[in-house]
Amino acid sequence: MNISGILGYLATFAIAAGAYAIASLGLNIQFGYTGLYNFGIAAFFATGAYVEGIITGGHSTEHLGGFGLPVVVGVLAAMVVSAILAYLIGIPTLRLKGEFLGISSLGIAETIRLILTNEKWLAGGVWGLGDIPRPLGNLVAPKLYNWVYLGLIIAVVGIIYFLVQKITSSPWGRVLKAIREDEGVAAAMGKNVYKYKMQSLILGSVIMAVGGAFYAHYIGYLSPESFRPLMGTFIIWAMLMAGGKGNNKGAILGAFVVWGVWTFTEFLVNYLPSALASRAGYINAIFIAILFQVLIRFRPQGILSED
């Protein structure tokens, strides 16, 4: 592989890691600051991706959408739909405790994925959703496009990081930490715990949807299989825990570290015997497990400590 190919690969790696970093920031609000066990990240990540694809994609008689609207409109629509979805999910689940919330949210995410799989009229069903346009694609030479899109992703990650940092450093963020540490004490101080948890769930989910929207433009084609629990939920949890929960820089750093390990193992598979290459999915998981064994031994709080 020549230098140009290596640089191009690094650009695509950073784009995907950036999209996951956005979702990791959303999870950090929910779990890192509020203590919400959201195992349904895939629901909001997929919602952002599919709404973006439906709103901005080309015309199709096979499924809903094909409006061809600007990317900004798609992102705003993804944010609104994910906020509504988070609110509806939060009503029955936020009164549950710990692992019960996690199990419920995981089940809801799988239900949404199965709906996307079986309802062809909605988003193409098992055939997926394609023809997702490239933002600014008509203005940039194909050789330079990934670098331009990477610049856009970096800008979006930077803006979201700045906003999340401001919000979580405010009195509102301190209330979230109080709820995480002891809901009873927060309630005794006159705080409406349910309201704050709902706000945290909605805000984090909206941010996850933004990550999904930009992921859709990067990948160009969406399939329900892309949002199974492993890639749609648990890898994002791994990113946050590796980087350091309660630390927004850690949420971003963890996304790049975990995605780096994941993509390295995929690259490594090309040089393995065919018998091992056929088990590539297991090899990815093994390397992530090794990473966590090292972190648990030397940095149990994550690479970066809580703010």
Image (cartoon, helix red, strand yellow):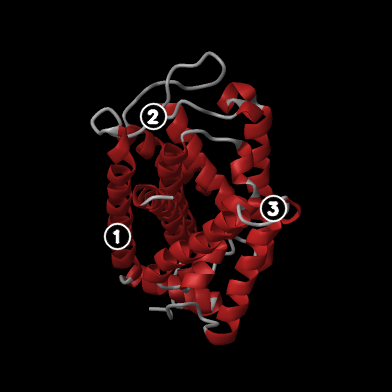
On the image, numbered disc 1 is attached to which residue?
Answer: 163
Q: Tell me if residue 24 comes above or below residue 124 in the rendering.
A: below
Q: Observer-nearest residue: 153 or 47?
A: 153
Distance between the alpha carbons at the discs numbered 1 and 2: 27 Å
Q: Quadrant of residue 235?
A: bottom right
Q: Which mark is residue 35?
A: none
Q: Tell me if residue 110 comes above or below residue 280 in the rendering.
A: above
On the image, numbered disc 2 is attached to which residue?
Answer: 133
- Residue lying farthest to the bottom in this orientation: 298
Amino acid carrying label 3: it is Ala
Q: Earlier in the sequence, mark 1 or mark 2?
A: 2
- Residue lying farthest to the left in this orientation: 139
Badge count: 3
- In x, y percent, where is residue 135? 32, 34
Distance between the alpha carbons at the discs numbered 3 and 2: 33 Å
How many residues crowd mark 1 within 10 Å: few (<14), some (14–19), many (20+)? few
Q: Does residue 194 appear in the picture of this structure? A: no
Say which element carries label 2.
Answer: loop
Q: Going by the image, does 284 lie left or right of 32?
A: right
Write the residue at 63% across / 23% down: 120
- In x, y percent, where is residue 165? 32, 66
